[in-house]
Image: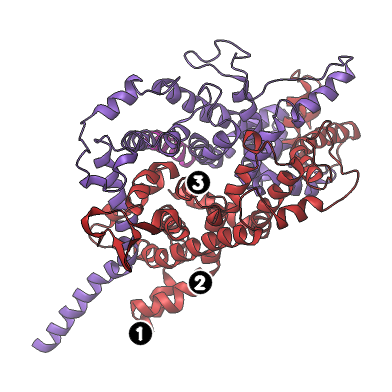
Chain colours: A purple, B red
Amino acid sequence: MALANKKDKNLRVKRNLLPYYYLLPAFLIMGVITFYPLIYQVIISFTNFETQHLLLGLRSPELRFVGLKNYIDIFTGALPVENFNFFRVLEFNFWWAFSNVMLHVPAGVLIAVLLNTEGIWFKKLYRALYILPIVVPPIVVATVWRNIFDEQYGAMNQLLTTVTALFGHLDPVRLRWLTEYTPPIPGFLPGAPLTLAYYAMMIANFWLGWPLMSVIATGALQSIPRDLYEAASIDGATGSQQFWNITVPLLRPAMVPAAVYGFTITFNLFGLVFFMTGGGPARSTEILVTFAYNLVRNLRWFGVAAAFAVIIFGVALIVLLITNRITRATQSYSEA
Amino acid sequence: MSAQSPASSKNLLVRFLTMNTSGQSSGRDLPLWRQILIQALCLFILFSVMFPIMYIVTLSLSPKTQRPSALELFPKEISFIAYKQVFDHPTGNPVSFSELLRNSVGLSVSVGLVALLVAVTAAYAFSRFNFKMREVLMVLVFIPLLMPGVGLVTPLYLLLNQFKIVDCGQGVTALMPLFACDGGERGRLIFNLRDSLLGVGIAMSAGALPFAIWNLKGYLDTIPKELEEAAAIDGADTNQTFWKIILPLAAPQLAVTFFIGFIGNWQEFVTSWLFLTQPKDYTLAMTLYNMTGQYASSIPWNRFAAMAVIVAMPVAVVYIALQKQIVGGLTTGGVKG
């Protein structure tokens, strides 16, 4: 009896430990390549780590702990970098993500609704071709659009030249898409000038972004029961009434998480910004991640870069808390 | 039927967009005028979608090495000379196309596989077991997902940079940071982990692993528990259940997770562009960046275009083949959080 009890206990201990065995490989590896670097990052964010300390790292005799200096320099704009203002970059970053999603989601929904029309020709063909932007890797998209917006040889100016020629304006269009600093609509966003490069990036990212929203909206549209529309038209609801009172509310549970996903992706959309403008002209299209990359890759101020990464982490956490709230609010809406 | 009521005074676009949702209510044919309007709109959207693609494909098939002076969206003549040049001699750097391809494929595949292997047991533990600290450990694993790729490169750069093999002279080799050359003398650097594909692979795994755990956990959660209960009644222990029931069931999702990882790794730029300095280690993505815009005053645009098509191709093929699973996987995972 006692023996059986002991065996039983051993078995139970073994079973209690089992999940940790399953977790062990992942945590060992993440401990070395993720958690330790994260802590190391916080430590060096309080130092003046620069290129000359690379050899000895934290053991360098000249490495000094500078307290919060790196953070203060970033927030007050005291870094010796031209045209850098943290809060302007932050404001632009939020506006960039917000304005993109505000265009992608409605466009995606409207096009999905359009293609959901019964009886239109070539529906399958359109659906197949419209997803092509999802299929092309974003870095290729960014490099291609970079060349499309080239002021001398780019396709966009050539297209505009062709179009304006139809209206009798024969001079070639020479818009300086990526280098012109004067904003086309002055004072649109207070504190941060929206240069032509911003609109160029918007066009490229619109091309990249709406098809995914459209795919998600199509899936959600097809799960809306048809009886709802039938009942509504029997009750005399017009098409637009049906759209606003049936389609929109029933798409919302699918589209809000999609919009949140889009916002997070766009907020940190490194490739498109870095490849198209590199944050220029005069840092007007710089977002947090591209500036952080500049700090470590070009300026090699490792201490400042680490502090900036810690700040980015804080911003990401705030964004997550906000978006989580939005998602949860709509979840309860859909269940109500 | 009031869908066609002339009373609605909205502008035309909104009107037929909205009316057509109600077109679901009856199976009758569309009036021709509306069909034509919708077709016109669809064709316009099609043009905007196809414009960059046609432009770049046409450019890549052009034999002209000077920059395009006028817009061409359809190739006048088809020549593969730009592709041939890219294959023969991709950039001004002394690196062959096959080396670039090997670096890109090697990195993407090995990082994807390592992440998958390590992630699957952790995902299983999170999905199926209830244990102390489960919530805390889960938050720990998913914290790195919050961090954009740029957020972790600085410490990884500094840490990996410490691992070096140095030739101290007189046949002595030092393995830093464990051993250094005597007298603090700086020897000749043979190998720097940071400046190698291995180092980049390690750094990339730091981001790939949490994603793989998250994605697989989301899928394992959808496998019904009854299967395991049935297996337990038949006398299988937890390990057997994992190997014989869960893994085979999850195999398709393992493949999908691998390919989603592959798509991301194939385009990885942040880490490799920061870490690697020797042209022989360059990846296709880095080369493409080198061929763009102001960095490429000497590179003909048809060659750039050919390179863009080449870099896009593997991802496009994977995506088209697995379109449903990838979009589905991302959205179900995203909804669950």
**Does any portion of residue A131 appear in the rendered image?**
no
Where is the N terminus of chain B found, in terms of image quarters? top right
The percent coordinates of residue A265 (x first, y second) are 51, 40
Q: CA distance from mark 2 to mark 1?
A: 19 Å
N-terminal-most mark, 1 or 3: 1
Position of residue B300 in the picture relative to residue A309 (left or right): right
Labels 2, 1: front one:
2
N-terminal-most mark, 2 or 1: 1
Magenta segment boundaries in residue numbering: A318-336
Labels 1, 3: front one:
3
Q: Residue at x 36, y 37 (%)?
A: A309
Residue with the mark numbered 1: B235
Q: Residue at x 85, y 38 (%)?
A: B30
Q: Does the segment drawn in magenta span residue A332? A: yes
- Specify the amino acid type for callout 2: Leu
Q: Residues within 10 Å of mark 2 (few under 14, many from 20)?
A: some
Q: Residues within 10 Å of mark 3 (few under 14, many from 20)?
A: some
